[in-house]
Image (tube, grey):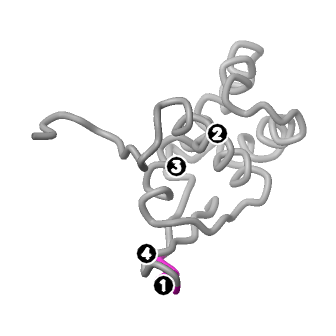
Amino acid sequence: MRHGRSGRKFNRNSSSREALARTQATALLREGRIQTTLSKAKELRPYVEKLITTAKGGDLHSRRIVARDIQDNSVLQKLFSEIAPKYQERPGGYCRILKVGVRRGDAVVMALIELV
């Protein structure tokens, strides 16, 4: 039984799941919108929202915490200079998930995740 166990495994080990979350978060912050599966989008949303909330602090400590996960310097600069100030007054809910349809090959539900 899975009582109290949160998160999806995606048939990957923990380091691969962490790498998946980091790369998808980097892509979302760079592009503003990405298309992925619904379950990956649901896992990505709280991950990105915590990064943005931390970046709203704006100090050196916040930058170092976020830099652990976002290792692309241009995306890190964009997060602190453009994205975080835009959401300064917003208390949360920075991402939106929209269902797009099903993928033709395996009929998995696809979703569009974007920054509000």
Disc ID at residue 108:
4
At numbered mark 2, what does the secondary structure look like: helix, strand or loop? Answer: helix
Which residue is at the front of the view, 71 or 63? 71
Q: Earlier in the sequence, mark 4 or mark 3?
A: 3
Residue 23 in which image quadrant:
top right
Disc ID at residue 22:
2
At numbered mark 4, what does the secondary structure look like: helix, strand or loop? Answer: loop
Q: Which residues are magenta?
A: 99-104
| Amino acid identity at mark 3 | Leu
Alpha carbons under labels 4 and 2: distance apart: 22 Å
Alpha carbons under labels 2 and 1: distance apart: 25 Å
* Residue corresponding to mark 1: 101
| Amino acid identity at mark 4 | Val
| C-beta proximity under 8 Å, tags 4 and 1 | no
Residue 28 in which image quadrant:
bottom right
Image height of 109 relative to 63, above or below: below
Alpha carbons under labels 1 and 3: distance apart: 19 Å
- Residue at the far top: name it: 61
